Amino acid sequence: MSRIQNPDEDVRTFLDYAGRIINVNVLGRDWEDDFVNAISGMQIDSLKESFRRGFAKSLTGKLTPAEYEHHTDWYFDDDAEFHSHLALLWQKFYGDADPRDSLAG
């Protein structure tokens, strides 16, 4: 099966890390905290910034549920469930920060 390739480099960064760290088939009990800690612990600031921009872009419509599902093996019944999943994860990472404020790089 071929990989779905998002044209946006930042979204690809987000998908790369999400696909490796929160693939539904390898989740641990504290998967959300593990994901936040893994990204927070990144040594390369430019990657951390690209991840945040890609996450923000994903929340603002630059990522489809199908792309995310393809990379993470998650499944969502509809767009609202997908968006809710991303919004809850965003809050764990960045609190009440507005994703739109993170779009520029």
Image (spheres, helix red, strand yellow):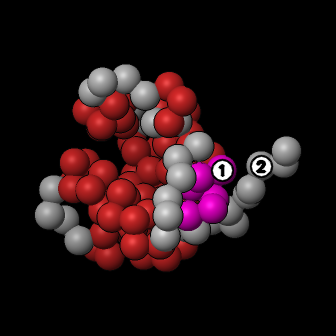
Q: Amino acid at mark 1?
A: His
Residue at (77, 49) in percent of width and height: 3
Could you say which is closer to the camera, residue 95 or residue 69? 69
Q: Which mark is residue 70?
A: 1
Q: Residue furthest front?
A: 77
- Are discs 2 and 1 less than 8 Å apart at CB? yes
Residue at (67, 62) in percent of width and height: 6
Q: Position of residue 71 (x, y in %)?
A: 62, 46
Q: Position of residue 44 (x, y in %)?
A: 43, 36
**54 horizontally vs 99: left or right:** right
Residue 53: in sight, yes or no?
Answer: no
Find disc 2 in the rendering and name its residue: 3
User: Of label 2 and label 1, which has the lower sequence position?
Assistant: 2
Picture quadrant where residue 35 is located: top left
Q: Residue furthest right?
A: 1
Q: Which image quarter holds the N terminus?
A: top right
Find the magenta span and give its range. 65-70
Q: Which image quarter holds the C terminus?
A: bottom left
